[in-house]
Image (cartoon, helix red, strand yellow):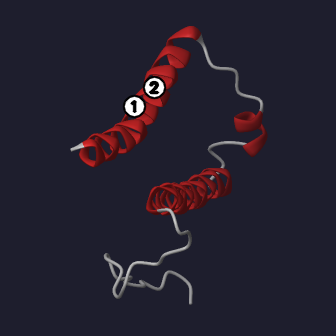
Amino acid sequence: MKNQNIKLESAPKGKKAKFFDNSEIDYLFSIITMLTQELSVTYDRIETLELILEKNGLINKGEIDNWVSNESEELIRSKRREDLISRIFNVIHEEAELTKK
């Protein structure tokens, strides 16, 4: 099974799952589920990168654990976090605006 390409469906098929009586809670649950899936994939990819880099003698994983960012790197990371949070809450804000109409 090593390096086997697996093609997954890009869009779910069938009826949308309903977990709660309140559609807004279902909507938020869907967002949390989607973010959890994305985060899981991100963790897997980062771990793969670390393993490849360590295997090829380019890094020691301990270096990553002990890394201290400088001010410039922190500014970049802070901006990226703010942008991510903004995108997530924008989706929620747009949905709230649609329900007001």
Name the residue tied to disc 2.
82
Residue 43 in picture, x, y percent from top left: 60, 55
Q: Relative to 5, does residue 86 appear above or below in the rendering? A: above
Q: Is residue 71 toward the left or the right of residue 16 in the image?
A: right
Name the residue tied to disc 1.
86
Q: Relative to 12, does residue 43 appear above or below in the rendering? A: above
Identify the residue at horizontal 42%, vertical 83% (top origin).
5
Quadrant location of the C terminus in the rendered image: top left
Identify the residue at horizontal 51%, vertical 25% (top origin).
77
Identify the residue at horizontal 46%, vertical 33% (top origin).
85
Q: Relative to 37, does residue 83 appear above or below in the rendering? A: above
Q: CA distance from mark 2 to mark 1?
A: 6 Å
- Foreground pick, 62 / 73: 73
Q: Relative to 45, does residue 88 appear above or below in the rendering? A: above
Residues under numbered marks 2 and 1 in contact, where contact means CB atoms less than 8 Å apart? yes
- Foreground pick, 41 / 95: 95
- Say which amino acid is labelled 1: Ser
Q: Is residue 98 toward the left or the right of residue 68 in the image?
A: left
Q: Helix, strand or loop at disc 1? A: helix
